[in-house]
Image (spheres, rainbow, N blue to C red):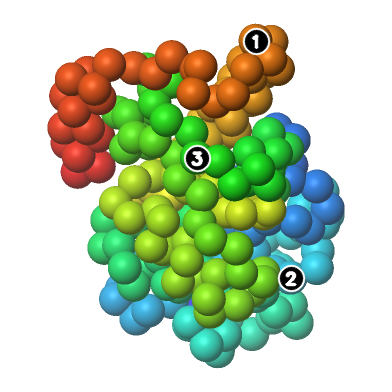
Amino acid sequence: MEEKYSGLRETVCACARKAADEGLVSGSSGNVSVRAPGGEGLCVITPSGIGYDALLPEQVVVCDEKGNKAVDVETGPSMELPLHSAIYKARNDVHAVVHTHAVYSTVVSVLRIGIPPIIEEMVPFLGGELEVAEYAPAGSRQLADNVTAALGGKAAVLLANHGNLGVGKDLDKAFYAALLCERVARIYVESLKIIGAPAEKIHTIPEDVVEKEKEMYENMKQ
């Protein structure tokens, strides 16, 4: 059984390390998972409490939504397992989730302001504006419900006082969604700093362009 999931565990471990290298997380913050194939309701997820600079593939957990392990390991799954499981249940098109505590995304989420379409990549790659999920304690079922609702059919969402989350049909796409979300948040924050004006002064992409690019996003999800 352990060998069956070895490739996925290596992929999850590599993605977590990459998130740390990109400055999206520090220590053991954030979490990464993929939906295990086979329709058994399992996911392959980063463990709790292990810094990504020291994380090994054999410490990555394979479990169901209740934390029951399919592979015998000493580590336990991330406390955000309910969040990942809720997204997999709600979105058949999602096979990977990357949750980060990236700085600019967290700045925006602390202010509780969503980000409208301000750069071209947002709509075709993320699905449109970035919304902020209502606050709930980390690891709670309420957080899982809030994030799933705010995410909707998009590829990224901001978590109030808690960073961002990207999803995709594979880990590369989920990671890119989280990374792009952070880039958008930085552009937004820096723009507000430069002009010293309220968010309403930021120019957004024209609505007709947004609608066309939303069609692109739906096609690209497939």
What's the residue at 31%, 68% (across, down)? Answer: 90
Q: Position of residue 31 (x, y in %)?
A: 63, 58
Q: Position of residue 129 (x, y in %)?
A: 39, 36
Structural crowding at the residue carrying mark 2, measured as other residues with C-alpha within 10 Å and reported as few (<14), some (14–19) or many (≥20): many
Residue named by callout 3: 114
Residue 53 appears in view = yes
Residue named by callout 1: 195
What's the residue at 45%, 40% (across, down)? Answer: 130
Marks 1 and 2, the one that precedes in the sequence: 2
Q: Amino acid at mark 3?
A: Gly
Q: CA distance from mark 1 to mark 2?
A: 41 Å
* Figure quadrant of residue 55: bottom right
Q: Amino acid at mark 1?
A: Ile
Which SS class for mark 1? Answer: helix
Foreground pick, 74 / 204: 204
Foreground pick, 179 / 74: 179
Residue named by callout 2: 48
* Quadrant location, the C terminus: top left
What's the residue at 59%, 47% (across, down)? Answer: 112
Q: Position of residue 60 (x, y in %)?
A: 65, 67
